[in-house]
Every structure is written in structure tokens, then in C-alpha cells.
Image (tube, rainbow, N blue to C red):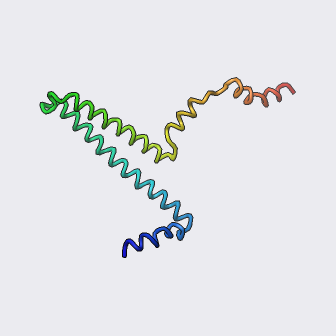
């Protein structure tokens, strides 16, 4: 019975809500995703700390390479999660901002466009 409900009635659900509710749901989903991501990042940070502690302890003797590889993998995952968090929270990814910064700006043209009206008034 539940499968019947999911197959036939659930696809119609999004079309029955007003647009305002849909945007509220989207915002709620984003907040929930951010909260889950923060929890995952906290857990990953704890795992990184625990791995570092094992490296310093007697249990880490002879396992340095293995623990370093594990630590590197955990740090990469944390960086990916941080990027995902920034993308979710701002709505755009950092790569878009970096591309914008990398775009060449012709400062001479920009300055000329900015000062042209002023210079025209001074010439009059």
C-alpha cells in the first residue's frame, strides 16, 4: 500500500504546493543539508585529530606511512566538504569567484570610461 502511494501520489505533490511554499521548502532543505554537512565536517575533524593522536602514540610506530596516507585522505575529504559548504551557503562555488578574479581587467579602459564624463565637463 505504501509503495502504491509513493508511486502514484508522491509525484503529484510538488505541483500542488504554491510557489512560496516551494521556495520555503528549498530553503529548509538547504539549511538541513548545511547542518548535516557541518556535522560531517565535525566528525571528520575528530577523525583527523584521532589519527594524529595515533601517529604520536606507541600505536603509530611502524604505521607512519599508512597513517599519513589516511590523514591525507581525510584532509582532502574535509577540504571538499568545506567547498561544498561554501557552495551551498552562498549558492555559488568558489571556483566561480576565482574565475572572476582571474579575468583580465583593462584598468586603462576602466579608468578612461570612469573619467570621460568628468573630463568632458571640465573641457566645457
Choose between 11 and 21: the one closer to the eye: 11
Choose between 120 and 78: the one closer to the eye: 78
Q: Residue 91's x, y, as percent?
A: 51, 47
Q: Residue furthest top?
A: 108
In the image, residue 19 above or below residue 57? below
Q: Quadrant of residue 63?
A: top left
Number of numbered discs present? 0
Q: Quadrant of residue 116?
A: top right
Q: Quadrant of residue 104?
A: top right
Q: Residue 24's x, y, as percent?
A: 50, 61
Q: Residue 98's x, y, as percent?
A: 53, 33
Quarter of the image with the C terminus is top right
Name the side, left or right, on which 122 lies relative to 57: right
Q: Residue 44's x, y, as percent?
A: 30, 42
In the image, residue 9 above or below residue 81? below
Q: Residue furthest left?
A: 58
Quarter of the image with the N terminus is bottom left
Q: What residue lies at 48% left-to-right and 67% top-to-bottom?
A: 11
Q: What residue lies at 74% left-to-right and 26% top-to-bottom?
A: 112
In the image, residue 101 above or below residue 9? above
Q: Residue furthest bottom?
A: 1
Q: What residue lies at 22% left-to-right and 28% top-to-bottom?
A: 65
Amino acid at each position: 500500500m505504501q509503495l502504491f502511494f509513493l508511486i502514484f501520489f508522491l509525484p503529484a505533490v510538488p505541483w500542488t504546493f504554491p510557489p512560496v511554499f516551494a521556495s520555503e521548502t528549498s530553503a529548509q532543505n538547504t539549511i538541513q543539508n548545511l547542518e548535516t554537512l557541518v556535522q560531517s565536517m565535525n566528525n571528520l575533524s575528530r577523525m583527523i585529530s584521532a589519527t594524529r593522536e595515533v601517529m604520536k602514540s606507541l600505536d603509530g610506530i611502524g604505521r607512519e606511512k599508512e597513517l599519513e596516507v589516511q590523514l591525507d585522505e581525510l584532509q582532502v575529504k574535509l577540504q571538499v566538504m568545506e567547498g561544498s559548504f561554501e557552495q551551498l551557503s552562498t549558492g555559488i562555488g568558489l571556483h566561480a569567484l576565482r574565475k572572476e578574479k582571474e579575468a583580465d581587467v583593462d584598468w586603462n579602459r576602466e579608468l578612461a570610461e570612469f573619467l570621460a564624463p568628468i573630463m568632458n565637463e571640465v573641457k566645457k
